């Protein structure tokens, strides 16, 4: 049973899109997605430094576009629902996962996330805030320390990782006195996402999302709110488009419960997990929390052959496909995800 997952903000690294441009059709695909986002994805994904692509208005469409480029490179003309059994995305990755599930078109997902990104960037600019991963330690003690510091547990990722979010002073204080046996790692994001600090962004984005063109999911799509697939409705066995759009908007101010998404994958019997670009974070978590589940991180086109092999062994019966072109790998770092 195959799950396709999509990473969140903080997974981007300078130049990570460059090797994808060597694949036929990808330059044209990225130009189309750039038009949808009103962001020059090629320039930001190949030339910009880490600080530039840390900007929320750049990072979010860049990450979603990269995931969809990787998806199409792996699947070719096949529909995701003919290959995968379930999909999920971490934070902004939920919009890429919505495209995997057929709720949004690729252009629609990148266009919608650009609205989300701009609204969140403006909210983040209103007050200096940030996010830090708290890795290790006793889970209850970590949550208590985050609350005691006046911070929010914005991402509960599982695998001994919780992301704290809030004021920079409070984050600095937590780093100076971390919970026992825990490390505090600042993340490359520009604000306290998935907290009340994003209230104005939620208000703006909810209006846009509610009227965005969308279709009902064509395969199970897990929600970051509770880790569960959207409930079936008459004529919509995997949930309603309107419910997905409403949840995507609500997640701007709600915690990401990736731990619950992973629990659901185990309960569903997942045996293979494919993480789309810019990959590494979610497969890293899966190795610690999903015992026995085989993982492949598609970091560059050089990983497509491994992805096709995973699909052939864990995906739907029609998952076999020709091998991918030989393109050199582009190294990326595995960092905690926001």
Image (tube, grey):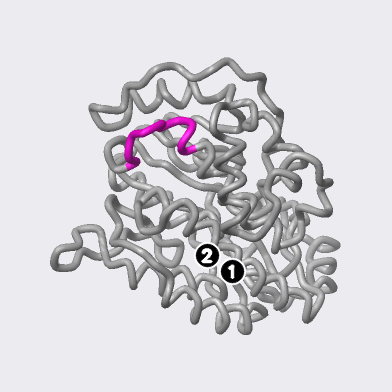
Residue 83 counted in the magenta span:
no
How far is mark 1 from mark 2, CA to CA?
A: 7 Å
Q: Position of residue 236 (x, y in %)?
A: 20, 62
Residue 74 counted in the magenta span:
yes
| Residue range highlighted in magenta | 71-80
Q: Which mark is residue 112?
A: 2
Q: Position of residue 185 (x, y in %)?
A: 76, 53
Residue at left offset 55%, top offset 24%: 303
Q: Are marks 1 and 2 in contact (CB under 8 Å)?
A: yes
On screen, residue 20 above or below 96: above
On screen, residue 185 versus residue 227, left or right, reads right
Residue at left offset 47%, top offset 38%: 71
- Main SS of the magenta part reads helix
Residue at left offset 57%, top offset 58%: 36
| SS of the residue under disc 2 | helix
On screen, residue 39 versus residue 297, left or right, reads right
**Quadrant of the image for the N terminus?**
top left
Q: Mark 1 or 2, which is nearer the eye? A: 2
Q: Position of residue 284 (x, y in %)?
A: 57, 38
Q: Position of residue 59 (x, y in %)?
A: 69, 55
In the rendered image, which residue does mark 1 sit on?
116
Specify the quadrant of the image occupied by residue 38: bottom right
Q: Nearer the viewer, residue 135 or 58?
A: 58
On screen, residue 186 above or below 1: below
Residue at left offset 60%, top offset 64%: 114
């Amino acid at each position: 049973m195959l799950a396709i997952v999509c990473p969140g903000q903080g997974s981007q690294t300078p130049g990570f899109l460059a090797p994808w441009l060597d694949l036929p059709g990808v330059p044209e695909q990225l130009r189309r997605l750039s038009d949808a986002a009103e962001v020059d994805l090629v320039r930001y994904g190949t030339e910009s430094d880490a600080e530039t692509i840390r900007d929320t208005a750049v990072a979010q469409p860049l990450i979603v576009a990269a995931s969809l480029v990787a998806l199409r490179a792996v699947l070719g003309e096949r529909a995701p629902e003919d290959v995968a059994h379930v999909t999920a995305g971490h934070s902004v990755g939920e919009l890429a996962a919505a495209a995997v599930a057929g709720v949004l078109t690729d252009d629609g997902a990148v266009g919608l996330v650009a609205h989300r990104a701009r609204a969140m960037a403006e909210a983040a600019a209103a007050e200096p805030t940030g996010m830090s991963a708290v890795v290790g330690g006793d889970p209850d003690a970590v949550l208590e320390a985050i609350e005691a510091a006046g911070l929010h547990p914005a991402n509960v990722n599982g695998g001994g990782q919780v992301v704290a979010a809030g004021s920079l002073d409070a984050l600095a204080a937590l780093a100076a006195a971390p919970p026992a046996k825990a490390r505090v790692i600042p993340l490359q994001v520009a604000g306290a996402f998935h907290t009340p600090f994003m209230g104005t962004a939620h208000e703006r984005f909810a209006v846009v999302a509610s009227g965005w063109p969308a279709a009902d999911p064509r395969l199970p799509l897990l929600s970051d709110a509770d880790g569960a697939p959207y409930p079936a409705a008459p004529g919509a066995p995997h949930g309603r488009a309107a419910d997905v759009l409403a949840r995507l908007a609500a997640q701007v101010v709600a915690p990401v419960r990736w731990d619950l998404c992973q629990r659901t994958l185990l309960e569903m019997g997942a045996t293979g997990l494919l993480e789309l670009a810019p990959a590494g974070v979610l497969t890293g978590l899966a190795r610690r929390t999903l015992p026995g589940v085989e993982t492949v991180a598609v970091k560059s086109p050089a990983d497509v052959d491994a992805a096709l092999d995973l699909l052939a062994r864990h995906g739907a019966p029609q998952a076999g496909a020709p091998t991918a072109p030989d393109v050199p790998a582009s190294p990326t770092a595995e960092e905690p995800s926001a």
